Amino acid sequence: MGCWMVYLPDQFRDDDPERLFALIEGSPLGTLVTLDGGELVADHIPFILDTRGDGPARLLGHVARANPLWR
């Protein structure tokens, strides 16, 4: 599995953690895009921003067992 880099023009870049964290906390429903059998699949799942600890912030998501994505 690789990491994709997306071109982001400077006028759309925001590197202010406080502003980004507020955006995530204010809109916790996100879209997780995965690849399944060569097809892109988009699932809307809730996310929680975890800023505890000394490490970098993490996004924690929840997938219901009724959603095949959990496997």
Image (cartoon, rainbow, N blue to C red):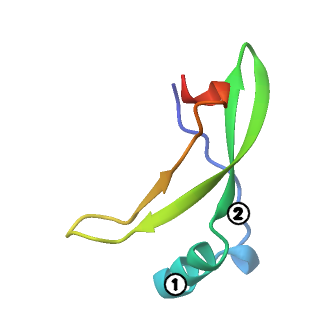
Taking the spot 53% from the left edge, 47% from the top edge, the residue there is 62
Residue position marked by numbered label 1 in the rendering:
16
Image x and y of residue 69, in percent: 62, 29
Earlier sequence position, callout 2 versus callout 1:
2
Q: Give the Cα distance between marks 2 and 1.
A: 15 Å
Which image quadrant for residue 24? bottom right
Residue position marked by numbered label 2 in the rendering:
8
Q: Between 23 and 1, which is closer to the camera in this rendering?
A: 23
* Residue type highlighted by circle 1: Asp
Which image quadrant for residue 14? bottom right
Taking the spot 59% from the left edge, 38% from the top edge, the residue there is 64
Image x and y of residue 7, in percent: 71, 56
- Per the image, label 1 sits on a secondary structure element best described as loop
Taking the spot 61% from the left edge, 56% from the top edge, the residue there is 46
* Residue type highlighted by circle 2: Leu
Q: Residues within 10 Å of mark 2 (few under 14, many from 20)?
A: few
- Closer mark to the observer between disc 2 and disc 1: 1
> Which residue of the protein is positioned furthest toward the top in this rendering?
37
| 45 w.r.t. 34: above or below | below
Image x and y of residue 25, in percent: 56, 76
| 67 w.r.t. 30: above or below | above
Q: Between 47 and 53, which is closer to the camera in this rendering?
A: 47
Q: Is residue 14 visible?
A: no
Taking the spot 78% from the left edge, 29% from the top edge, the residue there is 40
| 20 w.r.t. 1: above or below | below
